Amino acid sequence: GGWGSNDAYQLGFNDTVSRNVPVLNTLLSQYGITKIVAGDSFALGLTANGQVYSWGSNENGQCGVSTTTLPIAIPHLVSIGSGEKIVDIAAGESSSFAVTDMGDLYSWGLGTFGTLGHGVTTTVKSPKKVVAVSNVQHVFIRSYSTFALTSSGEIYAWGANTDGQLCLNSG
């Protein structure tokens, strides 16, 4: 179920009615979603068979539909393009991430502070592979700071570091 603000269809009910108590979402239940992550007015859902769906605000391409169509009312299948199974997802303010079973990391959405890991600060409207990191098991983002944990225990960090949150200082 879902509850809270729903002005951009972010609760996945195919309407903009906000809910102030948990409500069963029969529409989302049809997709076999096993994990949901929420950004600012949008969400991603990971299915048991490794697919990613997105819905809600898409003003910065965070839903991965190759445009900035506003908003996505019904869950949309995100095409990663590699044919790999997705095993982990994360959502930032207006950015999205997916980890494949081969350890590849893909990102899309708002690139402010280099959040997406592509070496630029521009918007990416569809999933793009982050080439600077491999063998990723998990990805985490908070606002505009991103972390990836690899299968060997290495932690990569990028994006906003205004308060030292990336822990990049040695010593």
Image: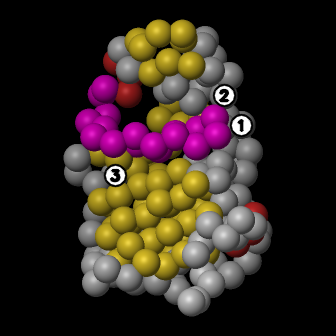
Q: Quadrant of residue 108?
A: bottom right
Is 81 placed above or below 7 here? below
Say left or right for 18 vs 80.
right
Is 117 placed above or below 143 here? below
Please provide percent x and percent y for residue 65. Answer: 59, 51
Q: How far apart, in angstroms, are the residues tagged by discs 3 and 2? A: 22 Å
Give the residue drawn at x 30%, y 60%.
87
Q: State the quadrant of the C terminus.
A: bottom right
Is 167 placed above or below 18 here? below
Please provide percent x and percent y for residue 146. Answer: 56, 66
Q: How far apart, in angstroms, are the residues tagged by discs 1 and 3? A: 22 Å
Q: Secondary structure at mark 2?
A: loop
Q: Mark 1 is on which residue type?
A: Leu
Residue 8: image tag = 2
User: Which residue was labeled with disc 3?
Assistant: 51
User: Which residue was labeled with disc 1?
Assistant: 70
What residue span does the magenta drawing correspond to? 29-45
Q: Mark 2 is on which residue type?
A: Ala
Please provide percent x and percent y for residue 100. Answer: 34, 68
Of labels 2 and 1, the one closer to you: 2
